[in-house]
Image (cartoon, rainbow, N blue to C red):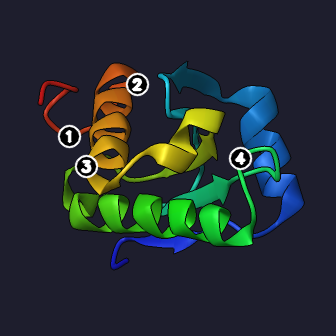
Amino acid sequence: MLFSESMKKTNDFLNVYRNGKSYADKNIVIYVWKNEGSRNKLGISCSKKVGNSVVRHRFARLVRESYRLHEDIFNSGLDIVVVARACAKDANFFDIEKSVLSLAGKARIIKNGGDL
């Protein structure tokens, strides 16, 4: 990811959960919060309720790849947390990509104003 970095600290996640705005569909929930920096921070959360470690890591890889492919259309200076729902374990790449882009459009964090 050229314009982004990974969110790793628990306090960063908690800050986005408490202060950010959430958008959801059947596969994922996205929390968005503006940070003071010029780079985006992407965090991925997937609980044990979704599946075993293989399923959870697959979900994380799919989200990371779908974000990486469309990274240039996102506004900068955002903290974004993607949380898996139970349906995400059966979703393929195109379902996850569609969810990420549609929720980003709802959140209006895409450069052209949210219209895809």
Please say if the residues under marks 3 and 1 sit with CB atoms less than 8 Å apart: no
**Mark closer to the chain start, 2 or 3:** 3
Name the residue beneath numbered marker 4.
Answer: 50
- First of labels 3, 1 by sequence position: 3
Cα distance, mark 2 to mark 3?
20 Å
Q: CA distance from mark 3 to mark 1?
A: 22 Å
- Residue under pointer 2: 107
Dot 3 alpha-carbon crowd within 10 angstroms: few under 14, some 14 to 19, many 20 or more: few
Local crowd size for mark 4, using a 10 Å CA cut-off: few (<14), some (14–19), many (≥20): some
For mark 4, give the secondary structure. loop
Q: Callout 1: helix, strand or loop?
A: loop
Res 94 label: 3
- CA separation in Å, label 2 and label 1: 11 Å
Q: Earlier in the sequence, mark 4 or mark 1?
A: 4
In the displayed structure, would residue 48 be above or below residue 102? below
On the picture, is 46 further left or further right than 10?
Answer: left
Give the spatial CA distance, label 4 vs label 1: 32 Å
Labels 4 and 2: the sequence-earlier one: 4
Amino acid type of the residue tagged 2 in the rendering: Ala
- Label 1: which residue? 111
